[in-house]
Image (cartoon, helix red, strand yellow):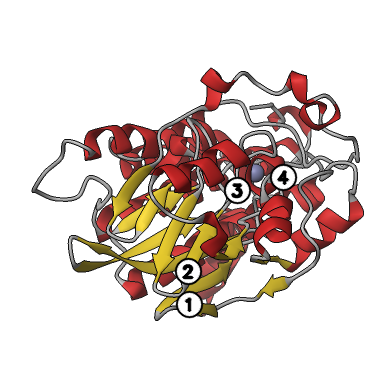
Amino acid sequence: MSSRSGQVLVALAIVCGPVVLGQSSPTARRDFDAEYRTAVQAAKEAAGVEHLGALVRTCLLPQSGGENTTDNVPAYVADPSKAPARESWDAEPARVFDNLYFVGGKIHSSWALTTSEGILLFDTVYPYNSEPLIVGGLQKLGLDPARIRHVFISHAHGDHIGGAELLQKRYRARVVMGGADWESVERFPNRFKTMAPGRDLVATDGMPVTLGGTTVTVWTTPGHTPGTISYIFPVEDRGRRVTVVYSGGTAFNFVNNAPDPGIRNFQTYIDSQRKLAARAAAAGATVLLSNHSEFDSAVKKNRVLAGWGNGPHPYEIGAESVQRYFKVLESCARAAQIRLEQRHAGGSAARSN
Ligand SMILES: [Zn+2]
């Protein structure tokens, strides 16, 4: 190679530099629309039929507004007659696995994991329906609510923390919640009126909670709220041990349309999905549970369970499908993040979604 052709190559490399470097160069023109379509397509392919609820909520429906920063007493607390009618939320309690029971409503779920030493309860629905659904549901199933020892609150929103104060006061249950969400409960006394447990156990990443030989491992999965937590625990399916991953927060209600922290919030969410997916894979999780029926079809599956008989358990979707669930959330969060990046890239590229 002559020194002259070498110079030409160097010059070409400089000219082509920004194109080759793509996204990392401030002068490069990103094709945001193509990036967005690729992310949504990845989510659609991962969703299959099982995870259409997650796909619709996080990729296809308009995103809900930003995180609530007000401290108002919710209408259903200020005036209990304003609470939604019972027929809009009532659902039958169900025994889902040998030692796992559903005590939630049509839309929001609560789960009871029984052990020889008492009950571990996951999420507590609203203040207006936690008593009939959880206390009443456990009794209907022949379980004693006074045996609730730990209450895990995935995140401090009224549809999951609603019964925490009641269960702590009445049964002296220990309450486990993420640190940032404990702070939120203390910062907004009106918003959490009648729901706020006294500060108790602060969840840390990888924290084991053991009762009667059953261990729940808590994973911090910030994103939906800063303190959102998720869990991995074993259940028994007709005597066979099966591992559950419980995803604690799903929708993008944290959206802040400012680039900072908006884009960063999405990255936090994406990182949490990747982390929980990896923990679920390592634990061999083949069951995915949620605190919204929308994402795990709990109420629908509970209806078929009664007459199910033998055969594969309808909740056991397999390790590969569990991974695809997290892929849907990660890809839809990336798609929304791309739109936010596009909006703040300036000029005519900006468009809303
Ligand atoms: Zn929430």
Task: Describe the element under mark 4 as helix, strand or loop.
Answer: loop
Residue located beneath label 1 in the image: 211
Q: Position of residue 252 (x, y in %)?
A: 63, 42
Kind of residue at disc 3:
Thr
Q: Quadrant of the N terminus?
A: bottom left
Tell me the kind of residue under disc 2.
Gly
Q: Is residue 213 left or right of residue 252?
A: left
* Residue at figure coordinates x 77%, y 27% from the top left: 76
Looking at the image, tell me whether mark 1 or mark 4 is earlier in sequence order.
1
Residue contact at pointers 2 and 1, CB within 8 angstroms: yes
Q: Above or below — where is 334 with respect to 264?
A: above
The label nearer to you, 2 versus 3, is 2
CA–CA distance between discs 2 and 3? 17 Å
Mark seen at residue 254: 4
Give whichever of discs 2 and 1 has the lower sequence position: 2
Q: Secondary structure at mark 3?
A: loop
User: Would you say 282 lies left or right of 229 here?
Assistant: left
CA–CA distance between discs 2 and 1?
7 Å
Mark 3 closeness class: few <14, some 14–19, many ≥20 residues within 10 Å: many
Q: Residues within 10 Å of mark 4 (few under 14, many from 20)?
A: many
Give the number of the mark in front: 1 or 4.
Answer: 1
The residue that disc 3 covers is 124
Badge 2 is on which residue?
Answer: 118
Q: Which of the 4 quarters of the picture holds residue 270?
A: bottom right
- The reply to whether discs 2 and 4 touch (Cβ–Cβ < 8 Å) is no
Q: Amino acid at mark 4?
A: Phe
Label 1 secondary element? strand
